[in-house]
Image (spheres, rainbow, N blue to C red):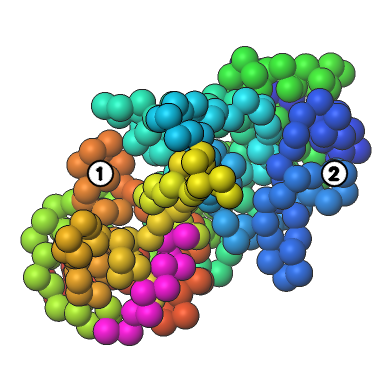
Amino acid sequence: MSIKKVGSAEFKGWVQSLIKKHTVYGVQAKEDRFAFDVLDAPEDLRLDYDVTILPPKKYIQPQKEVLLTFDENGVFESVMNEESFLILGVHPYDMVAISQMDKVFTKDNRDEHYMAYRERATIIVSDVQTASKDVFAGCMGTSTGEECSGHDVLLTLLADGSSLLEAKTEKGEALLDLIPNAAEPHEGDLEARSAIWESNRKELRKHELHVAPSDLPELLERSYDHPVWNEKSELCYACGSCNLVCPTCYCFNVQDDFNWDLKSGTRSRCWDSCMVSSFAKVAGDHDFRPLAAARYRHRYYRKGKYVPDMIGEIACVGCGRCITSCTAKIANPAEVYNCLLEKV
Ligand code: SF4
Ligand code: SF4
């Protein structure tokens, strides 16, 4: 696969050609924060962003997605995404999260609705230029383009204002073909990129995790009755914000909506939150996790044990969004896991 070096004007021209050929979702400023949205012009792209409000998974597992339509005779028809699109500027930790979702949604039962989005997505990862205030990806091994996979192009801005573009797939190679006269990078450019990776591993540590991520399942194994679950959850509002901003949370609720004729309708799924009190309630009004402490513990077990037991990876990529979004200031995975380490 090829690597190209482009100047800032050339890069802008490349983004313009991407916009002409694809539906491009790129990071843009929204007042004093950042969000992925449809990109209309290269000037609107903000690759110097710190973190986006919602992760780019929203384009692959939409917040609300119609799965099928049905009618009064029980005839149903699946609704599948058929649109191709390109996501530009995904940070490495968010790419690790998407790769984890790929594993979860294809393990045992392949989720065709998820794959209809995933297979039509082209993803350009951008190395982080500005560390957000709560990121700890450096502790989780998810802070650089060297540590993620599943994307089509890796983009790294160098100190001289030029960018390195590395194709990772055939789709990515085709995107780089749109800049035929781009220069090959020198050895020094690749060394500069390695230095950026080294720096990001150190800088993206606004919170320190005092346990190796690979040891988390074992630590949690012996922490089920730890007092921290009660202590922290006493302050929890059960608002679900920590779930909704998380790039590795993928739980959804399924609901049927009838049309005005009361004979036909749609079945859809939408993001759900295990921190909300109704999440584990089933028919007969039985609630598997009626206590806030049980819901709070479940979230950290899911990230550090249940999903790792399933796919072999820790399901927290250290983006820090839950820390920033929690008004009660209790959703800090690094702090919670450190607490288990100290008191066990
Ligand atoms: S648990 Fe928090 S820090 Fe970890 S990936 Fe989810 S939102 Fe990011
Ligand atoms: S964001 Fe904070 S208050 Fe809201 S559910 Fe999560 S832990 Fe509880």
- Residue drawn at x 83%, y 22% is 179
Q: Residues within 10 Å of mark 2 (few under 14, many from 20)?
A: some
Q: Secondary structure at mark 2?
A: loop
> Could you say where residue 253 lies in the image, as x and y percent from the top left?
39, 51
Sooner in the amino-acid sequence: mark 2 or mark 1:
2
Q: Nearer the viewer, residue 107 or 256?
A: 256
> Could you say where residue 31 lies in the image, as x and y percent from the top left?
76, 69
- Residue drawn at x 38%, y 80% is 237
In the image, residue 127 lies in the stretch drawn in magenta: no
Which amino acid is tagged 1? Answer: Pro
On the question of residue 206 being in view, the answer is no
Q: Is residue 326 above or below residue 287?
A: below
Q: Nearer the viewer, residue 71 or 283?
A: 71
> Could you say where residue 104 lies in the image, as x and y percent from the top left?
34, 36
Marks 2, 1: nearer the viewer: 2
In the image, residue 242 lies in the stretch drawn in magenta: yes
Say the numbered circle drawn on residue 40. Answer: 2
Residue stretch in magenta: 234-244
Q: Main secondary structure of the magenta part?
A: loop
Rendering quadrant holding ligand 2: bottom left
Give residue 277's quadrant in the image: bottom left
Callout 1: CB less than 8 Å from ligand 1: no
- Residue drawn at x 87%, y 34% is 16
Q: Are marks 2 and 1 in contact (CB under 8 Å)?
A: no
Determine which residue is flagged by label 1: 308
Location of the C terminus by quadrant is bottom left
Is residue 241 found left or right of 224 in the rendered image?
right
Which amino acid is tagged 2? Answer: Asp
- Residue drawn at x 64%, y 19% is 171
Callout 2: CB less than 8 Å from ligand 1: no
Give residue 340's quadrant in the image: bottom left
